[in-house]
Amino acid sequence: MKMLFLVLCFIVASVSSAHAQTSNPSPVGRWQVKFTLADTSERNLVFTAQEGGDGSFQLLDTAPDNKPVPNPHAAAWSFAKGNLSISGEAELQTGSCCRETGTLIFKAKLTSNNSMSGKLIFVTNIEEEESPYKYHATAGTFTASRLK
């Protein structure tokens, strides 16, 4: 009888643990990200999040002539207390004439296991004298959905 009770307790604990794991959103996987910076049109990238905080950006329409960038850029992410932070280097067109390299920083909330949204900042690598931080930054918003 004791053995049957222990087996039943183990089964209940296993089912409860599996349910808890599936109900917690996780950023690991591939995400279709649509983002807009101030004074720019909507841009797209695929963010791939791997276990341990590693990842990559595949910029889909940020190369000259709105073509995909051929190679993914390294990215990093962290997820704590429901807040997701993602960052990585990118080259983006700014305005109608210029391209700048810098760091894309995304701050997100996972609204479900298959979607997230939030704010982003693009901090350029070019020094700007008027800025108190000496770098130019542009803010925007984004949404993302998990790719199958």
Image (cartoon, grey):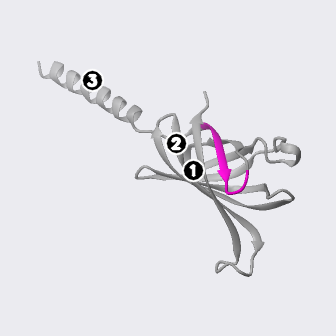
User: Magenta region, mostly helix, strand or loop?
Assistant: strand
| 133 w.r.t. 68: above or below | below
Alpha-carbon span between mark 2 and mark 1:
17 Å
89 to the left or right of 54: right
Find residue 83 and report its horizontal and vertical position in percent: 46, 52
Find residue 96 and report its horizontal and vertical position in percent: 84, 56
Find residue 28 and report its horizontal and vertical position in percent: 55, 40
47 to the left or right of 111: right
Question: Could you say which quadrant of the image residue 136 lies in?
Answer: bottom right
Q: Which residue is mark 3?
A: 11
Q: Earlier in the sequence, mark 1 or mark 3?
A: 3
Estimate how packed mark 1 is, as few (under 14), some (14 to 19) or many (20 or more) residues with alpha carbons within 10 Å: some
Numbered range of the magenta stretch: 30-40
Image quadrant in which the C terminus is located: top right
130 or 104: nearer the eye? Answer: 130
Secondary element at tag 1:
helix
Name the mark on residue 53.
1
| 47 w.r.t. 129: above or below | above
Residue shown at 76% from the left, 41% from the top: 60
Please report contact status of discs 1 and 3: CB closer than 8 Å, yes or no: no
Alpha-carbon span between mark 1 and mark 3:
32 Å
Q: Earlier in the sequence, mark 2 or mark 1?
A: 1
* Dot 3 amino acid type: Ile
Q: Single out the residue that lies furthest toward the left.
A: 1
Q: Is residue 32 magenta?
A: yes
Q: Is residue 68 magenta?
A: no
10 or 43: nearer the eye? Answer: 43
Q: Which residue is mark 2?
A: 116
143 or 20: nearer the eye? Answer: 143
* Dot 1 amino acid type: Gly
